Amino acid sequence: MNLRCAFCQTPYTLGRVEKISALQHMDAEKLTHYDAHCPRCRRATPIPRQRLEMTLPNWREALKELEVEMTAHPQHEAPLPKPEPFDQTQDKPVAVPQTESKPKPTPAKAEKKASAKSAPKAKTAEKKITTVKKATKKSK
């Protein structure tokens, strides 16, 4: 069933299962309309009972078929996410320590290259320091 929100004018649909459950709810509560909630603004759009029954005239038989189908093929609920630890004294979530991962072993060639690259940098830094010291001694 195609609907349009009365407030934000967003088009949306009601599926077969939702129509059956709406009719079942209206029949049990003796209601004259069903409130379909807009997926965008969450406001309720009233749908008259007659309009729902027009789109699904044999809804009682459809409900029985749906119940048989659900008993034959039950759908399990998705597991709930684990709650994060919460420190009530500070009113904030507690950081959970990550499991330590082992560092990847580096091949011997990579270690030699790394040490060879860092050695010239150290020598140039030493040269700069000694030249600065000599320059300051000469200027005095």
Image (tube, rainbow, N blue to C red):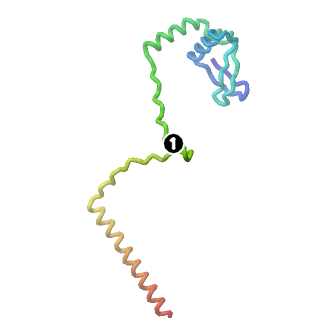
Residue 69 drawn at (x, y percent)? 47, 12
**x, y (%) of residue 62?**
54, 8
Up the image or down, 109 lies above or below 14; here it is: below
> Does residue 94 sit above or below 49 in this rendering?
below
Coordinates of residue 125 in the picture (x, y in percent): 41, 77
- Residue at 55% x, 46% y is 89
Q: Which residue is mark 1?
A: 86
Could you say where residue 45 lies in the image, as x and y percent from the top left? 70, 21
Left or right: 124 as drawn, with respect to 32: left
Q: Residue at x 47, y 14 (%)?
A: 70
Tag count: 1
Query: Which residue is situated farthest in the right direction here?
Result: 7
Q: At 67% from the left edge and 19% from the top edge, which residue is drawn?
A: 35
Task: Give the residue drawn at x 62%, y 21%.
Answer: 13
Label 1's element? strand
Residue type, label 1: Phe
> In front: 9, or 27?
27
Instruction: Decide: few, some or many residues near mark 1? Use Cα within 10 Å; few <14, some 14-19, many ≥20.
Output: few
Front-most of residues 100 and 118? 100
On the image, which quarter does residue 15 sit in?
A: top right
Where, by quadrant of the figure, is residue 20 drawn? top right
Q: Is residue 93 above or below residue 30?
A: below
**Image quadrant containing the N terminus:** top right
